[in-house]
Every structure is written in structure tokens, then in C-alpha cells.
Amino acid sequence: MGTETREAAVAYVDMEVKGGESIRQAVTAAAKKFGLKSESIRSFYRRRKKTKNRQHGHQLLTDDEELALAGLAETCSRVCCPLTRTELIDAVRGCKRLPETWNGWHWVDGFLDRHDATVRMGS
């Protein structure tokens, strides 16, 4: 089973469920449409829908903290006062009580990659 086919089947199930179908009906329809086993599609769908509180052991902020910080940065940029990278690093350093020696530039790059649609940085 190809990854593209699996992803397409899961996206199909997601679309059908949002349209009002039950998961069971959507999975059965996707299995027929894509020629996959319904058990596999259901498993992939459920695994994709699980919320992840932490992505890995080295994650600095929880998902909720990161969303709050992204919201703050978005709000600042909307009122024509976008945060600079240094201000963002200082905010995280103060919130998490990180030492002054913590180099947050790499973290900021990852943060901006994860939230590029909402966060705009100042100079």
C-alpha cells in the first residue's frame, strides 16, 4: 500500500466524516474506492486524529504554550508592532527560565516554520 494512496484514503474519510457520514460508513466507502482494507484505513485515520501533547523529548514548549505564543506574535503583528526574533527568544527564555547562554535562533527558525501562516516577524 502506497503512502499516497493511504493518505488519500484518510483524507477521503476525513472529508466524509466532516460531511456528516459515520466513521464506519466513510471507511467502508474509502476501502471500496481505494482498494484497501477497511481495518487499515480505520487504523490510519484514528492514528492521524490522535492529539499529540509533545512531539519529542526535546520539545521546549508544550503544544498549548506554543499556540499561545503564536497567537501573541500574530496579535502583535496585526496591530503593526510585530515581535522581533530577539524579543521572541527573550520571551521564551524568561517564561522557561532558560539561561542567558541559551541560543534560541535555531528554535525560532523551527517555530516560524511551524507557524509560518500566522506569525510575521519584525526587523
Image (cartoon, grey):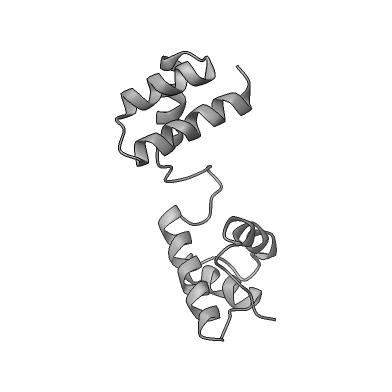
Q: Quadrant of residue 103?
A: bottom right
Q: Assign the N terminus to one quadrant of the image.
A: top right
As rendered, which of 78 and 114 lies closer to the eye?
A: 78
Q: Residue at position x 33%, y 24% from top? A: 25
As rendered, which of 106 and 121 lies closer to the eye?
A: 121
Q: Position of residue 60 (x, y in %)?
A: 53, 55
Q: Residue at position x 42%, y 16% from top? A: 38
Q: Is residue 55 above or below residue 61?
A: above
Q: Say left or right for 82 vs 63.
A: right
Q: Assign the C terminus to one quadrant of the image.
A: bottom right
As rendered, which of 119 and 6 lies closer to the eye?
A: 6
Q: Quadrant of residue 13?
A: top left
Q: Residue at position x 56%, y 86% from top? A: 80
Q: Is residue 36 above or below residue 75?
A: above
- Residue 49 seen: no
Q: Position of residue 113 (x, y in %)?
A: 64, 57
- Residue 39 seen: yes
